[in-house]
Image (cartoon, helix red, strand yellow):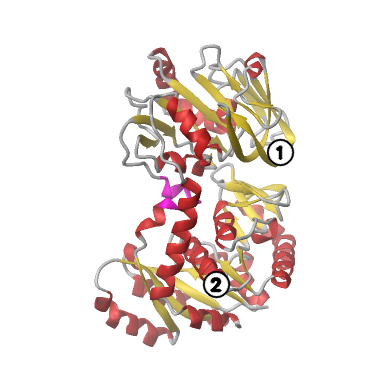
Amino acid sequence: MPALMIQGTGSNVGKSLLVAGLCRAARNRGLSVAPFKPQNMSNNAAVTADGGEIGRAQALQARACGLDPLADMNPVLLKPETDTGAQVVLQGRAIARAEACDYAALRPRLMAGVLDSFARLSAAHDLLIVEGAGSPAEVNLRPRDIANMGFARAAGVPVVLAGDIDRGGVIAQIVGTKAVIDPADAAMIRGFLVNKFRGDLRLFDDGYRMIEGATGWCGFGVLPWFADAHRLPSEDAVDLRASAGQGLHVVCLCLSRIANFDDLDPLAAEPGVRLTMLGPGQAIPGDADVVVIPGTKSTLGDLTFLRAQGWDIDLAAHVRRGGHVLGLCGGFQMLGRVVRDPLGSDGMAGEGAGLGFLDVETVMAPEKRLVRVAGTALGQAVMGYEIHMGRTTGPDCARPFAHLPGPDGAISRDGRIAGTYLHGLFSDDGFRAAWLAQFGASSRPGYEAGVDQVLDDLADHIEAHLDVAGLLALAGL
């Protein structure tokens, strides 16, 4: 079963991007390749072709392979609902809600699912490129690990360790990892690479040789900074970014459990849009044209968070000034009169008053709705997906936001407040142009084609600077 695993010296060292680029490079070489991530922790999820959910990074990696995403590509997905608890998704379906201290009890069941998914994907492709999570140097977590060395040892997959030179201390990152992990785990690591280098590569020659000498591992190259990485959908909330555009001012509230925030990436790419990702403690600016309340993994919890920032007061002032508000999924639910969660399906059981901008109410259901959809909105074709527990009804639903093909969402009588369950809506050029035109803003077409071009450029970048042939040989090809 040819496979290669990219682990990192820490979180956000670029593992997801490396795997996406290697997947596209392998595909360009004529291989049938698929991505695999044993365990992910993210509230940014994608709906798969087989009706499950996986992390958005794996969906992007599947796209790099020319594949529809499948639940097997990310068999365990942890979706944080509080600082200590998360919904546990196994092979695309939510199976439990677990506190961090209780997670170890689930390990045997989760590992069995991980290995089952790995075997099924391996049988269907020439090569799997596997992404680790966090760092294998978190040795305190090793006994219950299924994401890094726990998986690599169980599946017999060779590992390449990626370090991030941009954050500094990359020699210590890589050499220190070998120093603290178990020798049997260290034996799984067959090489290293250095990511995010800026400047003259020759200046790191001595450092590169120091790592080789101190670890005994083979170096597979130094990858310079890839400037267009920001044009690819991001999975991690730490990568939330504003845009440098000018014109229509769109403000997105960065909720504590923000989910599916890549919905706004196409707007961030528009030169005629200034997108502000508003963090905690910041007031909604008075020059905002549209305020977006994004998706969340905990609607009731983030209603409390929103009010704690004073954003409910700012929103009321924004609406009085004639501003517009768009709620996406959980944000749509917040715009209503009340949110009820009698079974604790979306976090803690209970109910709370919504913001009251739409005459609707939401009740959380026991089963999550996971479906890809297509229809129309603003007279334009739209495609996307739904991923939510809530069922929303009320008088304002008589003015739906979209037809998918049934009615979806709601719009206020004056048309300035709108909500929808549709994720991915702004990726459609026609809809995005029509939505922006409402506010007198123009649009640049070709967002989706641009993503594919960046994946091709990333693959070329990796081919130019890393030993791709050596990596594929290490994988068993």
Picture coordinates of residue 273 (x, y %)? 37, 35
Mark 2, residues whose alpha carbon is within 10 Å: few (<14), some, or many (≥20)?
many
On the image, numbered disc 2 is attached to which residue?
26
Residue 233 in the magenta stretch? The answer is yes
Amino acid type, mark 2: Ala
> Residue at left 63%, top 76%?
153
State whether the magenta stretch is mostly helix, strand or loop: loop
Answer with left or right where residue 454 lies relative to residue 393: left
Q: Which region of the structure is painted magenta?
A: 231-240
Query: Is 150 situated above or below 134?
Result: below
Q: Secondary structure under badge 2?
A: helix
Amino acid type, mark 1: Arg
The image quarter in which residue 31 lies: bottom right
Quarter holding the C terminus is bottom right
The image quarter in which residue 228 lies: bottom left
Answer with left or right where residue 326 lies relative to residue 299: left
Give the distance between the C-alpha atoms of the residues marked 1 and 2, in whole angstroms. 34 Å
On the image, numbered disc 1 is attached to which residue?
369
Query: Is 103 situated above or below 183?
Result: above
Observer-nearest of 210 and 373: 373
- Report the label total: 2
Among the two numbered marks 1 and 2 on one chain, the one whose residue lies closer to the N terminus: 2
Residue 289 in the magenta stretch? The answer is no
Observer-nearest of 276 and 108: 276
Q: Is residue 234 visible?
A: no
Q: Secondary structure under badge 1?
A: strand
Query: Is 107 situated above or below 423?
Result: below
> Residue at left 25%, top 68%?
199
